[in-house]
Image (cartoon, coloured by chain):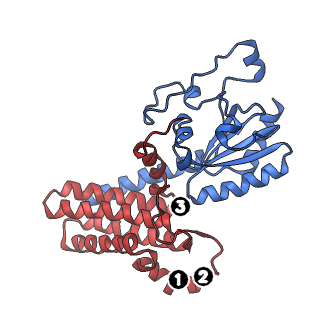
Chain colours: A blue, B red
Amino acid sequence: MRGLSLVLVVLVAATAFGLWRRQTDGRMKSVGGGSKAERERGAVQFPVPVGDDDPEVDVVAASTAEHGGEQLTAAQLGAELGSEATLVQFSTAFCQPCRATRRILDEVAGMVAGTVHIEIDAEAHLDLVRRLDVRRTPTVLVLDSQGRISKRAVGLPRKADVIAALGQVIRS
Amino acid sequence: MTQPVDCDPRVEVDVRGPRFAAAITTVVLAVILLTLDSTLGATLLVIQTLVFALGAFLGLRYQPYGILFRTLVQPRLAPPSEFEDAAPPRFAALVGFIFTAVALVGLVTGMSVIAYVAVAMALGAAFLNAAFGFCLGCEMYLIGRRIFARPVAA
């Protein structure tokens, strides 16, 4: 009896988790302090970057934790930013979805003028990983022309979502 | 950089193999959980622990469920179209081995609660892998690296 209830609990919980993940994986979330116009008006504060100490603590507000508006430079990324937008992908070795993500982002960067795809080995850049609170790979950050983080997706993104995200970032 | 789990980092496998193995594992672990208070359950647990150990320490080609797949199932399917690195499934086998070994220790020392919980966790991970292709070990990997690697100056 104990065994049976455990089996059921585990399967139900695992199914719920699996379905939730399937829903949220790869979804492009807007991060950052609102639109450019709002920022220029001073209507939104730039969030303070979270320190790179305890990666488990997540008591800061959502936008700060997602490091919206935070600016990344070519020096930090080891490659030039795109003139219109940049797709930054954090990967680890032996990560199957990372490969698929790489293919998608390469294709999209090729299609959209002024967009580059930069892939970062998370293990070789643990400082960035901690600073940006990257917990899973692939994590994709969409940067605007100034290198500010505008959108973030965790897990394999859909090609259409990436194109739509770029559309929003380039237009604003 | 850490060393890849597999000796040859470029070893690739048909993605259906590990998923098949995960499905068998899920069924076996469920049966174990249902019969853990009997000799059948204990025997199956020993067997499953060995199965995990073979895959984790010797490599996927020695994993019995994988062998079953290659000899019985794969020839009946369309030729493989998608490949993945052998390392994540191998790491998953290692994680599975740890869970089941802990369960065995719990069983042998009479702390059956530990055995039930450990097998239940292994079942959850195997089911997530079989049904959703979710790799628990892969997910834990980066978080583990963040915690255990020495801090680097920004």
Write down the residue under mark 1: B73
Mark 3 or mark 1, which has the lower sequence index?
1
Circles 1 and 2: CB distance less than 8 Å? yes
Does residue A123 appear left or right of residue B97 in this picture?
A: right
Indicate the chain on which mark 1 is placed.
B
Front one among B128 and B109: B109
Q: CA distance from mark 1 to mark 2?
A: 7 Å
Q: Find the distance from the CA under tag 3 to the CA under tag 1.
A: 19 Å
User: In this rendering, would B66 be left or right of B74?
Assistant: left
Q: Residue at x 21, y 54 (%)?
A: B113
Q: Is residue B30 left or right of residue A166?
A: left
Tell me what residue is drawn at x 74 percent, y 45 percent.
Answer: A162
Residue B55 placement (x, y as % from top left)? 40, 73
Foreground of the two, A30 or B151: B151
Residue that badge 2 annotates: B77
Residue at 25 percent of width and 72 percent of height: B46
Against A54, is A46 above or below?
A: above
Q: How busy is the neighbourhood of tag 1: few (under 14 within 10 Å), some, or many (20 plus)?
A: some
Q: Answer whether residue B86 is visible to the viewer in this image.
A: yes
Number of disc labels:
3
Of callouts 2 and 3, the N-terminal one: 2
**What amino acid type should be assigned to the residue bearing mark 3?**
Gly
Q: Position of residue A78 (x, y in %)?
A: 67, 43
Q: Identify which amino acid the numbered label 1 is placed on.
A: Val
| Residue at x-position 47% and y-position 53% | A15
* Chain containing the residue with disc 2: B
Residue B116: assigned label: none
